Image (spheres, rainbow, N blue to C red):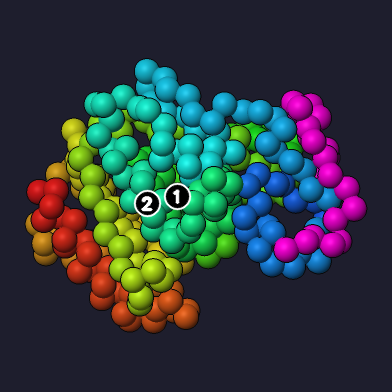
């Protein structure tokens, strides 16, 4: 879709070239959502791809993804064999139910910033204890755990003019055993619930997304028993935290969240 109200395009080559925040400005990475519907309030695009960030960098302490790393880059990158949790990358990407054309363009950072409940990159990053490097509009920076980044459906902690620079996935989490479960009203439908579990030397973590308005991560010193897990879900996630929309009613999402959580628990115990 054409963005007919856009009158200016910025193509920064460094952080110093980024324009000051102003009404009507929007950051452009992949643009798969930005160009999917009318954007009458957007009059200026700031193209982040011209910053030419390396998509994927392997460090001793983990994996760094540029915010502009595409879904295709993520799924096809050669990574250390001991990072067994990278097996989550492709199933999470497939949970987006997007064509190869979208994978070629859509970015990890864009999926995070959009903060949709069914954003599978949010699921992936929460499941692997990812941390964001955020460039703030005042020229500073801060680090934010992904499980604290999304605050509600479509809402994040980003301020006006802030942007995601990169995502760091720690090596300790990447070496864990993982499991993923998804359910939707139809085989190729948007996720009604998307859960991921990880078991490693630090214990067990269950990430709940898509069924809730924001991600929830439940942590345990070891894989819990079924009653402990069920009780924790009820205690940590209130009925009001479950989402109702065209892709599922809140009571259904709450029920299937419990079913999928138990499947993950059994697989990883």
Which quarter of the rendering shows the N terminus? bottom right
| Residue 79: image location, x then y, percent | 35, 27
Q: Nearer the viewer, mark 1 or mark 2?
A: 2
Q: Magenta region's main secondary structure?
A: loop
The residue furthest top is 60
- Viewer-proximal residue among 220 and 99: 99
| Residue 180: image location, x then y, percent | 27, 54
Q: Left of 39 or right of it: where is 216?
A: left
Which disc is residue 121 wearing?
A: 1
- Kindly state the secondary structure of the residue where label 2 is placed: helix
| Residue 53: image location, x then y, percent | 62, 28
In the rendered structure, are the residues bearing label 1 and label 2 in contact, judged by CB atoms less than 8 Å apart?
yes
Q: Left of 193 or right of it: where is 168?
A: right
Q: Give the magenta part as a residue range.
A: 1-22
- Kindly state the secondary structure of the residue where label 1 is placed: helix
| Residue 94: image location, x then y, percent | 39, 55
Q: Give the mark nearer the N terminus: 1 vs 2.
A: 2
Mark 2 lies on residue: 92
Q: Is residue 20 part of the magenta span, yes or no?
A: yes
């Amino acid at each position: 879709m054409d963005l007919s109200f856009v009158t200016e395009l910025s193509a920064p080559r460094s952080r110093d070239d980024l324009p000051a925040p102003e009404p009507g400005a929007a950051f452009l990475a992949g643009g798969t959502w930005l160009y999917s519907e009318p954007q009458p309030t957007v009059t200026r695009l700031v193209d982040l791809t011209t910053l030419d960030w390396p998509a994927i960098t392997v460090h001793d302490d983990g994996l760094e993804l540029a915010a502009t790393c595409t879904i295709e880059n993520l799924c096809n990158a050669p990574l250390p064999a001991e990072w067994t949790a990278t097996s989550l990358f492709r199933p999470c990407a497939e949970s987006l139910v997007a064509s190869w054309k979208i994978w070629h363009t859509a970015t990890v950072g864009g999926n995070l910033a959009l903060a949709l409940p069914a954003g599978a990159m949010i699921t992936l990053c929460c499941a692997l204890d990812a941390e964001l490097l955020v460039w703030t509009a005042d020229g500073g920076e801060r680090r934010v755990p992904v499980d604290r980044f999304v605050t509600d459906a479509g809402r994040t902690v980003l301020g006006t003019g802030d942007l995601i620079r990169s995502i760091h996935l720690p090596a300790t989490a990447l070496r864990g055993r993982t499991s993923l479960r998804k359910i939707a009203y139809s085989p190729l439908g948007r996720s009604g619930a998307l859960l991921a579990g990880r078991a490693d030397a630090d214990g067990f973590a269950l990430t709940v997304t898509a069924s809730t308005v924001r991600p929830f991560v439940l942590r345990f010193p070891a894989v819990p028993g079924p009653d402990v897990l069920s009780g924790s879900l009820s205690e940590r996630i209130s009925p009001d935290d479950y989402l109702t929309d065209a892709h599922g009613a809140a009571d259904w999402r709450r029920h299937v969240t419990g079913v999928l959580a138990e499947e993950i628990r059994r697989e990883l115990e």
